[in-house]
Image (cartoon, rainbow, N blue to C red):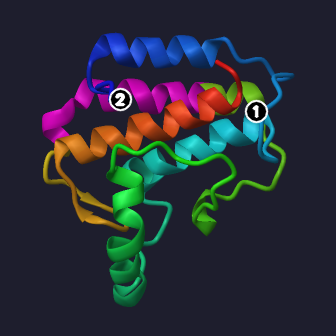
Amino acid sequence: MKNIFDAAVTNEVIARINQLTPETKGLWGKMSVAQMLAHCSVTYEMIYDETHPKPGFFKSLIMKLFVKNIVVGPKPYKKNSPTAPAFVINDKRNFQTEKKRLIDYLQKTQELGGSYFDGKESNAFGNLTESEWNIMFYKHLDHHLSQFAV
């Protein structure tokens, strides 16, 4: 798994994002490219913007037991996998706005570095290691950028 906290890897991901256009079509799934960019930003909204409430005790327990290993484990996501309700983007989004927002989040994350995230509590999975944060960030981005053939 590539290390998203490494500046070269972050720049590589940003270069992939910069290959997208408003007309880029996904190879699978229903999202437009602008919706995909917004979808990818949700992870960062949960960290930096606190716009998403933390799940209650029972839902958090279910997430830790059944979802955490899928999200922070090295096994790639399957195509057309279901997503959590907070990540569903149904409305029309502005491509340039969403692209800039995601890139800004990536740059902020890289600048803070892995040590900032080591032991940091996630919205749904409790405290994660630097490695788990990296896998969660990179794997999700790689999955969706591959979805849009970049």
Please name whichever residue, 74 or 119, is drawn nearer the observer in this view of the structure.
74
The amino acid on which the numbered mark 1 sits, given as a three-letter code, is Val
Q: Residue at x 61, y 28 (%)?
A: 145
Label 1: which secondary element: helix
Q: Quadrant of residue 6?
A: top left
Q: Residue at x 37, y 78 (%)?
A: 60
Q: Tell me the number on the disc at residue 33.
A: 1
Q: Tell me the number on the disc at residue 108.
A: 2
The image shows residue 149 at horizontal and vertical percentages of: 69, 21
Q: Which segment did they paint magenta?
A: 100-116
Q: Main secondary structure of the magenta part?
A: helix
Mark 2 Cα-neighbour bin, 10 Å: few <14, some 14–19, many ≥20: some
* Quadrant for the C terminus in the image: top right
User: How far is the residue under mark 2 from the one under mark 1?
Assistant: 22 Å
Answer left or right for 46 relative to 129. right
Answer left or right for 129 relative to 111. left
The image shows residue 30 at horizontal and vertical percentages of: 82, 47
Q: Residue at x 17, y 40 (%)?
A: 116
